[in-house]
Amino acid sequence: MNTEVCATFGIEFPLFAFSHCRDVVAAVTNAGGLGVLGAVAYTPDRLEEELRWIDDHVGGRPYGVDVLVPGKIDESAERAGRGEGGLDTMLAAIPQEHWDFLIGLFAKYDVPLPDFEKAKQSNARGGTSVTKEGATELIDVSLAHPIRLIASALGTPPPIMVEKAKAAGIPVAALVGTAEHARRQVAAGVDLVVAQGGEAGGHTGEISTMVLVPEVVDTVAPVPVLAAGGIATGRQMAAALALGASGVWCGSVWLTTEEAETAPAVKAKMLAATSRDTVRSRSRTGKPARQLRSAWTEEWEGPDSPGPLGMPLQMIVAEGAMRQITKVAESGNPGARALANYFVGQCVGLMNTVKPARQVVYDMVEEFAGAVDRLNTLTSAD
């Protein structure tokens, strides 16, 4: 599997694994791919801890970091990120009706309330990391480690990311959902474009992977492109390379691995889900993000909802609540189990067994080889 990205990054397989779990990142890197740690809402101290752990477990093999730097966020969050007014500035921007709706949701589903005051402060601190100022701190922490890639998860990377990465000799990647996004990313200095179709989990657009990948490949050539969005098998990996991609970027497929951070109750829902059991919803982050359809997503889109806030304010409202919901779901509480969800793509319908992340890599590579062999038989002459 000698593609351009294999040569650039020194990896055996053109398989990039996005995960919030350091164990998955290390496992995929050690199996011959390139693990990418999703540092969303991390504090600098936590990111430093996670990267030190990865350094100790990959033996110098290549890995990357993905930092979320949205192009547009709530103005109060920007002010808080600049240190104007502290966390109270961000918290004051959240209408009381949203907290009231959340409290009513817990009562409706008979889920014990969390310590909201404690959760508010914790989530507000995490919210500052998705501002440009907060993300810059995470970029500095990342570049102090022997990473081989830094990625911008949402929007065009800020000039400071590109400048600092290029000064350190680290390639910059960025996710795109349209060809126009890809043009802007390349103009901003991106070295690797991830064309992510609407099937993907997390923040995503609406164009399907099959349509988006060749369009982006043609738009940004000779810049290499990774295909993303609903990719969980070696057959899909072969299809992505046939579309002109130099490799694949996968996230959802790791959520049912043994190492994954996914809570057991949510993992069970994923293993039982079909490809129709996801929805793009603003209910977790404030921006459209594909996740498991649940009572949570239904309630936030329902007639009694005040409507999701923008990023990162909705994250402050949602994530503390979801931690409590997930915790209570593990006790068997039916209301919490109905509400519980997580970000995942439409490939969840292909994720039916729990395996080690290393085995997922090997299975994908073996299936890729089989798919290529089948294609070769179609073109070979008797």
Image (cartoon, grey):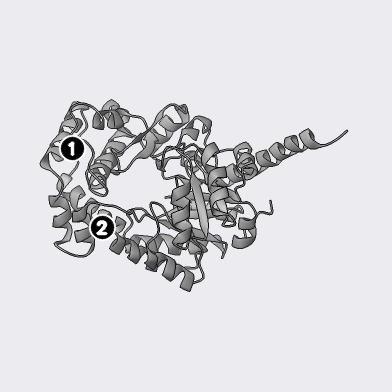
Residue 269: x and y in percent read 41, 30
Viewer-nearest residue: 250 or 179? 179
Quadrant assignment, res 9 = bottom right
Q: At label 1, which amino acid type do we have?
A: Leu
Viewer-nearest residue: 286 or 232? 286
Which residue is denoted by mark 1 in the rendering?
Answer: 113
Decide: few, some or many residues near mark 2? Use Cα within 10 Å; few <14, some 14-19, many ≥20. many
Q: Could one spot residue 113 in this view of the protein?
A: yes
Q: Which callout, 2 or 1, points to the residue nearer the camera?
A: 2
Residue 91: x and y in percent read 15, 51
Quadrant assignment, res 203 = top left
Please determine whether, in this image, residue 287 is positioned above or below residue 51.
above
Decide: few, some or many residues near mark 1? Use Cα within 10 Å; few <14, some 14-19, many ≥20. some
At 19% from the left edge and 49% from the top edge, which residue is drawn? Answer: 120
At 13% from the left edge and 56% from the top edge, which residue is drawn? Answer: 88
Q: In the rendered view, does 190 fall on the left or right side of 339?
A: right
Residue 86: x and y in percent read 16, 61
Q: At label 2, which amino acid type do we have?
A: Thr
Q: How far apart are marks 2 and 1 (CA)?
A: 25 Å
Which residue is denoted by mark 2 in the rendering?
Answer: 128
Please determine whether, in this image, residue 273 is positioned above or below residue 369.
above
